[in-house]
Image (cartoon, grey):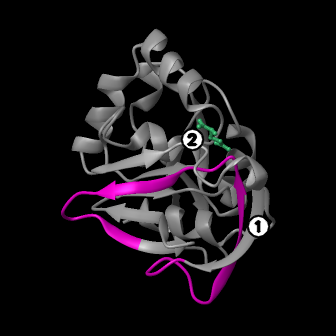
Amino acid sequence: MPAAAGSETGAAEIKPRIGVLAVQGGFQRHVEHLELAGADPFEVRLPVDLEGLDGLILPGGESTTIVMGIENAGLAPAILAHHEAGRPILGTCAGMIVAGREHLGLIDITTKRNAFGRQLASFEDDIEVDGVLEGTIRAVFIRAPWVESTGEGVKVLSEVRDHPVAVRQGTVTALSFHPELTPDNRIHKWFTGACTA
Ligand code: GLN
């Protein structure tokens, strides 16, 4: 259930309750960013945790471990139901891989793991993300995937080295990078807004 909080104007303000999948990986920083963005974050470990969420973040980490954790906890049906109800989902890095066609199938993409190569295990770049941000954002890539193929209806929002690193299909957005690892809160603000509608 969304928590109500008073705003500066005195009008009731509803904070969207946004789940962060917390089976493995970098979920804690997402929780902190969501709080700063004015959401009511919630760590998701069990199917029941998906109830009443307005949005869901699939964080970075190790996609094979996250996929195993989802299976062990029996989380897939609840995540799919969340998606089918039209509630927004944001996948970042390993979360992009998990959201793709080869795993949960929330977005019609295939991904290439560790795509930027060993020599570029991690790097940063200033990128634009169409329709999400004004100007550029400092994007941190850590053993990042890129999008290998996109189905119809998938919009490419950003490319690095000629490969998509931000994509959207309907209510699902997937990013190759880690927006939770810089102080820039705009991605979480944008997602919180998308979950408020
Ligand atoms: N290389 C990881 C994977 O393939 C993703 C890395 C990340 O999430 N930072 O699952």
Left or right position of 68 against 9: left
Instruction: Kindly identify the residue that appears in the image at 44 percent across and 56 percent down.
Output: 147
How crowded pointer 1 is (Cα within 10 Å; few <14, some 14-19, many 20+) is rated as few
Residue identified by numbered label 1: 124
Residue 197: x and y in percent read: 36, 66
Mark 1 lies on a secondary structure that is strand
Mark 2 lies on a secondary structure that is helix
Residue closer to the observer: 121 or 183: 121
Q: Are marks 1 and 2 in contact (CB under 8 Å)?
A: no
Mark 1 Cβ inside 8 Å of ligand 1: no
- Res. 56 visible in picture: no
Instruction: Kindly identify the residue that appears in the image at 63 percent across and 78 percent down.
Output: 127
Of labels 1 and 2, earlier in sequence is 2
The question of residue 51 being in magenta is answered with: no
Residue closer to the observer: 108 or 5: 108
Residue closer to the observer: 11 or 91: 91
For the residue marked with disc 2, what is the amino acid? Ala
Q: Is residue 186 above or below residue 103?
A: below
Q: Which mark is residue 94?
A: 2
- Res. 23 visible in picture: yes
Residue 55: x and y in percent read: 44, 49
Residue closer to the observer: 29 or 113: 113
Extreme top residue here?
72
**In the image, which residues are magenta?**
129-156
Mark 2 Cβ inside 8 Å of ligand 1: yes
Left or right position of 37 against 175: right
Instruction: Kindly identify the residue that appears in the image at 27 percent across and 61 percent down.
Output: 170
Residue 187: x and y in percent read: 60, 67
Ligand 1 quadrant? Answer: top right
The question of residue 142 being in magenta is answered with: yes
